[in-house]
């Protein structure tokens, strides 16, 4: 090794804090002062060090944070898929049913531990399922399998604290667990303003304000579909639907992320729980299994699921997802195409 | 050089693993910079880099319970970042933008240090490096890993990291020098 190469290596290592032989460093410095070639090396190296590393563009970090949050929320469904694949998961713990309190404040959201009814169902089925949270962006996510909802009422490591003072009517419908969703029966969905909302298992208590519309659904009654009044939820992505027996059920928008932005599931009418969404009337049904020529594939969303658009359109305006998505996907189990538009 | 290992990383990771989303968001915010820079150097495309950052932290989130703290968080993060970039490349979802050597050109000067070597110029030269050299330089220069930690993450001896880092720097200096010096 030449003296120049040796000196430059020492300088390089020293710039990383990796050189502990001060005598060697002093010798390298002495050489570099008298050697134009090595002096130029040191100057240029210093200039490179001064050049800042590339920074994320403005807004990118927030998009990433939002995207991570949403994708991790979706990941909360994954234990179901893991159980279906035969992997070992911890068995859920049965919890006592919450007790309804009569002195609830107006529109005071009485958060039910969303994992409680799901866990009970999973226990019966002996399927190790962490519990799914709803799809609303208001939820910050816990590591998959935990199932607790963060950010409003407790922490994931103390899930049993939920039931103590955050009760709900004992008769509130229970959202079906993912493992119970089959090709024959869809989730507990309603359609409001062409957007699909899923039952969260939470209840609210509306007593003030005016309804913003209605949904026509039999819910889980098995009878004819009837209109139910809709009130705004606590967040932009939730609604509250009142029932004939004076319950007020919270539904959350069904969403999927694309480039850090949430897209809501749009559908034609759904007249009862268990019915699958369909393409809205303004979106043509593709005639071929791969969607062509009605749709063309343009990439994947943030979950890695292929997305399709109508020719000449931008996915930012809306996109389709083909049937057959994996368990845990917001459209899993649906035998038809689904259509997603930006969450308003 | 940016040292990304922070004394409170282990506590943040532990809190995030317990479900503290605020702690995890802090990790994302504090460590997204080197992840983005590495991905940008890998793909040469800001959108791809942003997607990688998101995918990396989703993977980190899903694996929090497996992180035993034996290695520094930044070592783990670097390993995940490198693997995500390679996975994305293998899947064909993203392809690196070809390097335009014209981007590396800088104006002549007797003293390269006296002129502004812009980030864009350095980054273009970085992208022209062989991947294994760039990976080693990224581990040390962006993620703040020691040579030993980088060797562990890359699966090579510490001395190999040292050689690759020096080779990368030598190539960068050669590419960016404009004073008529040796360009070997």
Image (spheres, rainbow, N blue to C red):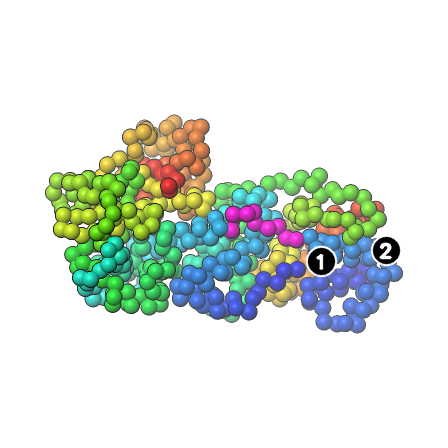
Subunit ID for the residue under disc 2: A
Label 1 element class: helix
User: Image point 34% across, 60% down: which residue?
Assistant: A152
Furthest residue to the front?
A208
User: Image point 61% across, 63% down: which residue?
Assistant: B3
Furthest residue to the left?
A223
Disc number placed over residue A225 in the picture, else none:
none
The percent position of residue A136, horizontal first and vertical second, equals 34, 50
Tell me which secondary structure the magenta stretch mostly adopts: loop
Q: Does the magenta stretch include residue A223?
A: no
Label 2 element class: helix
**Corner quadrant of residue A29:** bottom right
The percent position of residue A56, horizontal first and vertical second, equals 56, 49
- Of residue A127 and residue A166, the one placed in the foreground of this image is A166
Q: In this view, does A228 lie to the left or right of A317?
A: left
Callouts 2 and 1 on one subunit = no
- Of residue A99 and residue A326, the one placed in the foreground of this image is A99
A324, above or below A75, in the image:
above
Say if residue A119 shows up in the picture: no
Subunit ID for the residue under disc 1: B
Quadrant location of the N terminus of chain B? bottom right
Q: In this view, does A199 lie to the left or right of B92?
A: left
Say if residue B137 shows up in the picture: yes
Q: Is residue A55 magenta?
A: yes
For mark 2, what is the residue?
A36
Task: Bin the neighbour count of mark 2 within 10 Å (Cα to Cα): few under 14, some 14-19, many 20 and up.
Answer: few
Residues drawn in magenta: A52-61
For mark 1, what is the residue?
B166
């Amino acid at each position: 090794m030449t003296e120049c190469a040796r000196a430059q290596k020492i300088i390089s290592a020293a710039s990383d804090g990796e050189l502990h032989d001060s005598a060697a460093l002093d010798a390298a410095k002495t050489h570099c002062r008298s050697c134009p070639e090595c002096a130029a090396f040191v100057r240029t190296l210093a200039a490179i060090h001064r050049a800042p590393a590339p920074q994320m563009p403005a807004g990118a970090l927030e998009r990433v944070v939002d995207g991570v949050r949403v994708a991790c929320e979706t990941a909360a469904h994954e234990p179901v898929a893991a159980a279906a694949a035969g992997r070992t998961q911890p068995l859920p713990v049965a919890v006592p049913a919450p007790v309804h309190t009569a002195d609830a404040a107006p529109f005071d959201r009485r958060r039910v531990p969303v994992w409680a009814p799901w866990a009970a169902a999973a226990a019966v089925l002996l399927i190790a399922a962490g519990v799914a949270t709803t799809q609303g962006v208001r939820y910050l996510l816990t590591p998959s399998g935990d199932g607790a909802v963060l950010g409003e009422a407790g922490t994931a490591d103390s899930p049993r604290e939920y039931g103590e003072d955050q009760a709900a009517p004992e008769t509130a419908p229970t959202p079906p667990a993912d493992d119970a969703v089959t090709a024959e029966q869809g989730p507990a969905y309603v359609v409001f303003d062409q957007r699909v909302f899923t039952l969260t298992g939470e209840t609210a208590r509306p007593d003030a304000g005016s309804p913003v519309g209605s949904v026509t659904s039999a819910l889980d009654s098995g009878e004819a579909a009837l209109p139910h009044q809709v009130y705004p939820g606590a967040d932009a992505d939730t609604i509250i639907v009142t029932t004939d027996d004076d319950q007020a059920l919270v539904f959350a928008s069904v969403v999927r992320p694309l480039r850090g932005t949430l897209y809501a599931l749009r559908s034609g009418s759904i007249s009862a729980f268990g019915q699958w969404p369909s393409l809205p009337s303004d979106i043509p049904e593709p005639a071929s299994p791969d969607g062509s020529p009605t749709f063309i594939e343009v990439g994947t969303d943030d979950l890695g699921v292929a997305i399709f658009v109508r020719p000449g359109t931008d996915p930012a305006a809306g996109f389709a997802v083909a049937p057959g998505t994996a368990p845990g996907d917001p459209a899993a189990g649906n035998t038809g195409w689904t259509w997603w538009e930006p969450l308003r | 050089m940016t040292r990304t290992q922070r004394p409170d990383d282990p506590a943040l990771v532990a809190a995030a693993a317990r479900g503290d989303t605020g702690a995890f968001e802090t990790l994302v915010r504090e460590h997204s910079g080197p992840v983005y820079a590495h991905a940008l150097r890998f793909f040469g495309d800001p959108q791809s880099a942003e997607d990688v950052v998101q995918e990396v932290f989703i993977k980190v989130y899903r694996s929090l319970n497996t992180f035993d703290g034996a290695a520094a968080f930044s070592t783990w993060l670097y390993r995940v970042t490198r693997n995500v970039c390679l996975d994305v490349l293998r899947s064909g979802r993203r392809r690196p933008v070809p390097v335009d050597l014209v981007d590396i050109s800088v104006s002549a000067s007797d003293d390269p240090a006296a002129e502004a070597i812009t980030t864009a110029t350095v980054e273009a030269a970085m992208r022209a490096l062989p991947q294994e050299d760039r990976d080693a330089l990224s581990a040390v220069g962006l993620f703040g890993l020691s040579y030993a930690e980088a060797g562990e993450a890359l699966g090579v001896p510490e001395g190999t990291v040292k050689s690759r880092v020096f080779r990368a720097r030598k190539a960068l200096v050669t590419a960016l020098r404009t004073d008529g010096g040796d360009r070997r």
